[in-house]
Each structure stands twice: as C-alpha cells, then as structure tokens.
Amino acid sequence: MPSLLDRLRHAPLPLVPLLPAIVVVVGIGTALIVGLLGAAQLRSTSDAVAADRAKVLSTTLARRLRATSSEDQAQVVRRAARRSGAEILLASHEGTVITDATFGLPPDVSVTDLLSQEHGAIRTRIGRTMFAVEPLGTPFQTSALIVLVPAPSQPEGARALLRSVLALTALLVGVAAVVAFVFGRDLRADVDYVREQIEKMARPDTSPAGTLVPVRVADQVGLLTDAFNVLVDRFTAAERAYREDLTRVAALDRDRSAFLGALSHELRTPLNAILGFTDILLSEVDGPLDPDTRENLQMVRSSGSHLRGLIDDILELSALESGQLHLSRAVVDVHAVAEDVIREAAARLERKPIRLSVTGASPTLAHVDERRLWQVLSNLVGNAIKFTERGTVSIDVRMDQGNVVMSVADTGPGISAAELDAIFHEYRQAGPAHARRKGTGLGLFIAKRLVTMHGGTITVSSKIARGSTFVVRIPAFAIEPQEPDSPPSAIHVVDTTGAGA
C-alpha cells in the first residue's frame, strides 16, 4: 500500500491556489506569441516595401538611362545611388560590371546569379538587401540595371508594437490576476466553510446523524454542498431506522430473556421434586431396592442432574444478558476453592480412569465472588472430565505479577485450531459429536463473562491428541509479604484410578 508521501507526490496540484499564477503565465505566453507574430508580420511588410522600392527605382532609373548617352550613364547611376540610398550596379548580360555604385558584393554573390534571378533577397556588407533587375532595353539591349535596397532587420514600428503589446499585456494580465485571485479566494473560503462544517459533524460530542450545511453560493461548491446534504438526509434516515430496529431488537431480547428465566424457574420446581423423591428412594427409607430398580433410579437422578445443569446455564445467561447478575466479592483462598471443585468433580467421574489433582501455593488470595469462581473452575473441570477418557485433569494455582493464575489442564483429545476461537461463543461446542450432545454450549461463554466481570482473562491452548489447557487470570488480593519461615506450598491429590496416590 503506497505511503501518504507517495500519494501526495502523485496527486494532482490544487487548482484554486495556483489560479492567479496560471493566469499570469498564460497571459505572458500569449503576449510573447502576439509580439513574435506582430514582429514577423512587420518584417514581412518591410521586406515587401523594400522589394517594391527596388523595383520602382530600377524601372525609373532604367528609363532615365535609356535617354542618357553611354558616357553619362556612370555619373547618372552614382548620383541616383547617393540620392536614393540604394546600391546600384550597371552590368552586361554576360555578368561584366559596367558601373559599380555599391559597397561591394559579397564573394559568394555573382552578378550572373543576380541577373538570372531578376529579384529576391541577398545578404551584403550592409545586411539583408532586396534587389530588382531591370534590362535597359533599346538602344542598350546588352545591359541591365541591378538595384539593391536595404531591408532593415528591425522593421520600422517594431518598438512601438512591442511597447503597445507589453502595455496591453500588463493591463490584461493584471486585471485577470486580480479577478482570478478574488475568485480563488472566494472559492477557497467556500470550500473551507464546507470543510469546517463537516469537521464539526465528525466530532465525538456531536450527533452521528449530522446536520445540513447551508448553501451559500450557487456554483460548483453549492452543488457539492447540496449533494452532501442529500447524503446527510439519507444517513439520518438510515440512522433513525437503525435505532428503531435496535430498540425493537433490544425489547425482543429482553422479552426472550424474561421468558427463558420464567420458563427455567417453572422447570426447576418439578425437577427439584423429581430429584428429591429420587434421593429418598435411593436412600431405601421405604425398604430395600433390587439392583434393576436402583440402576433405573440412578439413571433418573443422573438425567435430572444434567437437566438441572442445563436450566442453570439458561438462568445464568438470562441474568447476564439482562444485567441482573451482580458479584458478591470477598477475600477468597483460590487454592481452597480449587480443592472443593476437584473434590466435587471426583463424584462425577463415572468410573473413568482419570487422576484429579490440585497444585500450587496456599493460601492464594483474591478479591472475588467465591460462588462465581467455583462456577468457572467447575465448568472447566467438568468439560475436561467430559472429553477425557483416561489420564489426568489438574488445576494449578500460582501467583504471577500481581495476578492469580489458575491453569486447568487435561489429557483429552484436544481442540483444533479452527475451533479455538469459537468455543467461547454462546451455543458453540467443540469435541466429538457424542460429547457435544451433553451440553448447551453456554458453559464456556458464561465462564468467560464471569472472568471478565472480575477484571480477568481466560485463554486456551491445545494440541490434538495431547490435551488442552485453560488459563484464567484474575487480580490478586494485596497482602503483606510473608515471613521467610512461612509454610511451603501445599499439594492436594485426589486419586480415582484405584492404584493409590
């Protein structure tokens, strides 16, 4: 992606600030072109005048020489050259000079060439010259008159033309520059005004819908402002519709949460009765039970406990979404809570060869809601037991830079990289299909929300076929440093494999 400097380097130059300079440059260029064309025209006219003068002089002098004797022709030619200021040659048709009243022809110019051309332009010692050839005629058929008239390099009137063009150019360029400056200033002022109004709309303290920009002038900026106002109107309408939809969705969400809460409470009442009577029957108060009946009752109790867990998850989700869930913080020994979670989880192993353990320092204090912390750890340990067929499930509690770190590790099937980001979303589960059917997909979502409410974080790392590790970090409770002779860290292990700890 190109940098800002590259984009500015290749961006077109702004026209408005450069408008007066452009007018001045164009005006000066136009004046130069007009001056050069005028000078060229004057030069062409001056050449034509010189050629006509050479022709007239040659014709007139030829008629005079026809009536003059041969002895007097030289004197007449020289007198005519002095009076007219032209150069005159009297030569024969073979190129022999009879009378020379010139300052000398250049070496590269021959009389024969002049006689053959009859008229044209050559460069002599005095500069550019227009010449005309006129035969003398009877009685001097073998002679011809060549008259050379200077053609000035700077035509007459060129200075006056240059002064006039410069004066007119200065006047027009000055007027155009002033007009361009005023136009550019007003145009830039209008653009700056529109920009300031848009910047006001972009401030965080203003309404996101924006306000209409007043149209001050009926030019291109005015058309742009009007188009922007149309966009603002459409955005305002879209924002209003969005807010209405958002309000309606929020109301529907509240109704859904209220319905789920009410339904969950209604389901828990008969479910608690079922579980209570099942416990009474399993206690054999009314008499002993045969093995089949006991197994059936245990299945009823297991299914009821699973259903109560699902209902509890729905209630928790409803409380979280409605904002009714509040924390009751106190100073809690996290290590002791982890031991209670492991002790309670040991009863749910269902004869799986899994070794449960808790490691870390005790006490490890944090200012948390003990019931919610127990819920988070219980959910993580319960998931680990559900997906682990054999091996270990452990909780490690330690201090790390002012945080209490709880790591729940298992030796289960692991979680693929594609599912790691999704497991904390509501109603999303990972792992084998038969295990996913045992839950709602709300446990990790609720656990993450509870950890976030405590100001902590929860992360996960996993390798396929090698297990997963969930790490929970919450701020520790500040206590006085322990004495050097404080008791060492404690380790509590619950062994359910039958082989002993």
Image (cartoon, rainbow, N blue to C red):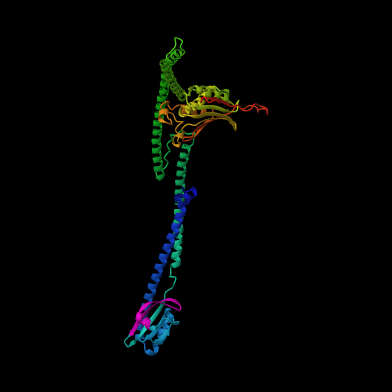
Quadrant of residue 226 within the rendered picture: top left
Residue furthest toward the front?
499
Quadrant of residue 127 within the rendered picture: bottom left
Q: Residue at x 39, y 80 (%)?
A: 147
Check the image and report above or below for 226 versus 125: above
Magenta residue span: 112-136
Quadrant (top left, top right, bottom left, bottom right) of the C terminus: top right
Asked whether residue 94 appears in the rendered view, the answer is yes
Tell whether 357 sits left or right of 77: right
Q: Is residue 75 magenta?
A: no
Check the image and report above or below for 237 versus 123: above
Quadrant of residue 77 within the rendered picture: bottom left
Asked whether residue 324 appears in the rendered view, the answer is no
Residue furthest toward the right?
484
Q: Main SS of the magenta segment?
A: strand
Q: Residue 180's spot in the image, x, y percent?
A: 45, 51
Tell whether 183 sits left or right of 133: right
Tell whether 437 sits left or right of 360: left
Residue furthest toward the bottom?
71
Q: Residue 135's spot in the image, x, y percent?
A: 34, 83
Seen from the viewer's position, the closer of residues 409 and 12 is 409
Q: Residue 385's spot in the image, x, y percent?
A: 48, 27
Q: Is residue 120 magenta?
A: yes
Check the image and report above or below for 497 versus 138: above
Q: Residue 204's spot in the image, x, y percent?
A: 49, 35
Count of labels shown? 0
Residue furthest toward the top?
286
Seen from the viewer's position, the closer of residues 460 and 229 is 460
